[in-house]
Amino acid sequence: MGGVARPARSAIAGAAVTALAVTAAACAAPNDDAKSGGGDSAVVGIAYEPDSLSPLLGYGKDGNSKIFDGLLTHDADMKLKPALAAELPKVTDDGRTYTYKLRDGVKFSDGKPFTSKDVVFTYESILDKKTNNASKAELDAVEDVEAKGDDTVVFHLKYPYAPFAERTVLPIAPEHVAGAQNVNNGRFTTKPIGTGPYELVKWSKGEKLVFKANPDYWGGAPKIKNFTMAIIKDDDVRATRLRSGDLDGAILPPNLAKTFKADTAKKTYAANSFDYRVVTLPTGNKVTGDNDIRRALDIGVDRKAMVEQILEGAGKEAYGPVPTDSPWFTKGTERAHDLGKAKKLLDEAGWKKGADGIRKKDGVRAAFPLWYLTGDKLRQDHALAYASDAKKLGIDVKVESGTWEVIMPRMPKDAVLAGGGAPADPDFDQYMMLKSSLAGDGFNNMAHYDNKKVDAALEDARRTDDKAKRQAAYDTVQRELAKDPGYTFLTHIDHLYVVDKKFGELTTQVEPHDHGLASGPWWNVEDWKA
């Protein structure tokens, strides 16, 4: 979840002091290739680093992976279009069979041909129980994958899974390389080979990912020949490096992005997203697991103030994983900020204020820690605002920061300021976040949420391609979240990027939570003009 359901692209290693030391060293190095360069080079600053570069472990599963291609990809409007497939799939058997004809003449960057066997290998490897891919539940509908000759792949599904075509943007790995290694820790996880527009030159962990253009790319050789993603976890350091000319572009929080408003050489891009910030309320904690506490916090937090003061208007209030302007949002599930009602709810539930102003019930003090990721200013600001609002209710929230290595072992009992969001289909984010059977599975269901009605609705929604039935199921999910809020959703965030104007007019897509690495104005850097 960037937290929640994206460990393969969101989990971060190293303390803030390490990040600062690394980035300082990078700034000082006179010949560092992670510096902004000429017209055919670009260096951008991102906040998060992947755990692995293997699609078998989850890298690039939502597209735009640079090193790889999927059978399909998204255009600027998030509509599916062919990539390694020559055309969109033929769907038969009442939505249970998807047939893909493959593009001719595609080669991996090592010169070996791409065939249907690579597709079968990729999907079978991900679904293998031995593979450490936390997102394999997204492919639950797949019964088997069949190669028909070198140029055709057929997916047979257990049930008609409406968004299945969206899952075929997943990058394809070469069987001749990855199949000869340990899927979980082999060399391919850090030195991948793909069919994509770029080849990996170097991955200096905690510092940068360096790519070079694939001259034989089937879609045409990119004009940006050298592309570097500088991994800078601290927002302030990222802004400083952009200001000094060390970067050509960067993702920034609103308060830092606005400091570039007067810079005539740079342009700010705002990308709409499904990205939300949320507080997990673990069921295993006597305070956060209490439904009255959860409901009081849900109406006691001032979401509007967070949008205005923290996001400076670059976002909207969140009442669940689905943004309020999405056609999948259930109207009427908005929760108005009402301190008086929240206090009354706690009073009637037996949570009485003590001499210190903090409530108690049955000897349990209404207090819990709230962790956020070190160096992430947006999460810090959300956490502090949440704690301030909770204090007004008589709930003591102690804000703590740490790396994911520190936070993850605490997730079953401690609250976390997390993030998530996937725009392609409501199943992708909600199932991984709310399904009780996934509790404790990495970043999936971090709150250990357990609601039988939600479980049933999630299954109903993914096992039909009838849009009305799916809408009804997701309406049930959102109404249950209003009654039984195992998470306090706070805001949906617009992503802000500041980029040098020398690259011309750029575009953005509607983005998932996992931003910067595969999203932002460089979602299609292979199409930029040098």
Image (spheres, rainbow, N blue to C red):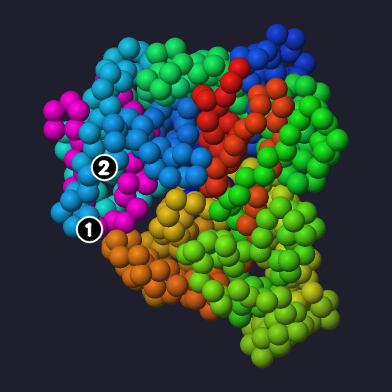
Instruction: Report the side of 306 relative to 483 (left or right).
Output: right
Which disc number belongs to residue 159?
1
Q: Residue 335's spot in the image, x, y percent?
A: 63, 75
Determine whether 267 is above or below 104 in the image: below
Mark drawn on residue 14: none
Quadrant of the drawing holding the C terminus = top right
Residue that numbered label 2 is attached to? 89
* Residue occupying image coordinates x 46% and y 39%: 75
Which type of secondary structure does the marked residue at label 1 adopt?
loop
Q: Is residue 330 magenta?
A: no
Dot placed on the residue nearer the N-terminal end, 2 or 1: 2
User: 10 Å neighbourhood of mark 1: few (<14), some, or many (≥20)?
Assistant: some
Q: Residue at x 73, y 59 (%)?
A: 307
Residue 35: image quadrant is top right
Q: Is residue 286 visible?
A: no
Label 2 CA crowd tier, 10 Å (few <14, some 14–19, many 20+)? many
Residue 162 located within the stretch drawn in magenta: yes
Give the amino acid at mark 1. Answer: Tyr
Q: What is the three-letter code of the residue carrying label 2?
A: Pro
- Marks 2 & 1, CB-CB < 8 Å contact: no
Q: Nearer the viewer, residue 24 or 155?
A: 155
For the residues marked 2 and 1, what is the alpha-carbon distance in whole angstroms? 17 Å
Report helix, strand or loop for mark 2. loop
Q: Hey, which residue is sitting farthest top in the picture? A: 31
The part of the image, by quadrant, that contains residue 529 is top right
Measuring from the top left, give residue 420's x and y in whole percent: 55, 52
Tell me the magenta residue range.
148-177
Q: Position of residue 249 (x, y in %)?
A: 69, 29
